Image (spheres, rainbow, N blue to C red):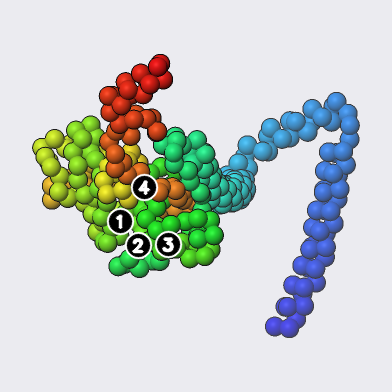
Amino acid sequence: MPRDRSTADTYTTPLKRLLAVLLVISLVGLFLLWRIDSPRVERFRAHVVDRVLPNFEWAMAPVTGTINLVRDFQSYRRLHDQNQELKRELQQMKKWKEAAVQLGQENARLLDLNKVRLDPRLTFITGVVMADSGSPFRQSVVLNVGARDGILNGWAAMDGLGLVGRISGVGERTSRVLLLTDAASRIPVTIQPSGQPAILAGDNTLAPALDFIENPDLVRPGDRVISSGDGGVFPPGLLVGQVATDPGGRSRVRLSADYERLEFLRVLRHHGHKTINDPGAMVLPPNAPDHPAETAQTQGDSNG
């Protein structure tokens, strides 16, 4: 047995060496053939490719499929990265959009505060909302204006859209505004265009109820609600909101003021209406005689 194994090695080793040398020579020759720049050699190369390559399509199919799979995977990876980048940009754009909307609303309120047309006898001072009580039983906000700015209890507070509430506490540098939505808030209002008087009663919701309507049949959803001025607390004609009906059929007011973004409030200086004790003072100028006879006698004395 050892002799047979040595004999096999004696024949196979030179054969392997011969095949390796032939393979190297063939590869070198093929390389040189492929590097020769000659029209005749070029035609020969084309003839060899036409003969050999179609017969090896089955062998190249797995390689081609693998290459295509790798390319598709790279393409999907790029698409995934682009999709993630677009999602990040979309989130950023949403943040910028929200900021732009808030700035636009704030700008609109400030512009409305500057251009609002009220009773020419009314003046106002604008304050910044510093804090919210956040209590479920009392709804109010604190302004950075107080007694040093001449603020008095009972004055009306508005944002750029509508009536918000009234001053219910004044400090030296701050004041508290009791909102219309508070359960302790009761203000007289007028419903337009029917002119029906009513009481706006807060109930800690964003849609206070309308009570004591004189003729409810004349009130329609969408009617305008303004302050009536009764009682001398609020000046008349301040916009409050619009009439709405809840599922139970009760009339409520959809407030015009934006209670979710109370940033600036305008406090109206309202010192009440002047009481007229002498009806004649409404017609005759001051220092004028009260009776026509006195006027005639005065004119006769001056002519004499």
**Mark earlier in primary sequence (3, 2):** 2
Q: Helix or strand or loop: what does disc 2 sit on?
A: loop
Residue denoted by label 2: 139
Residue in the picture at 42% in, 62% down: 176
Quadrant location of residue 64? Answer: top right
Q: Secondary structure at mark 3?
A: strand
Query: If you read the primary sequence from the N terminus, does the residue marked by circle 2 or circle 1 appear first?
Result: 2
Residue on which disc 1 sits: 181
Q: Residue furthest top?
A: 303
Q: Nearer the viewer, residue 24 or 19?
A: 24
The residue that appears at 80% across and 68% down in the rendered structure is 13
The residue tagged 3 is 176
Residue 88, can we see it?
Answer: yes
Quick check: marks 2 and 1 in contact, CB under 8 Å? yes
Looking at marks 3 and 1 on the same chain, the residue that comes earlier in the sequence is marked by 3
**At which x and y percent is residue 66?**
60, 50
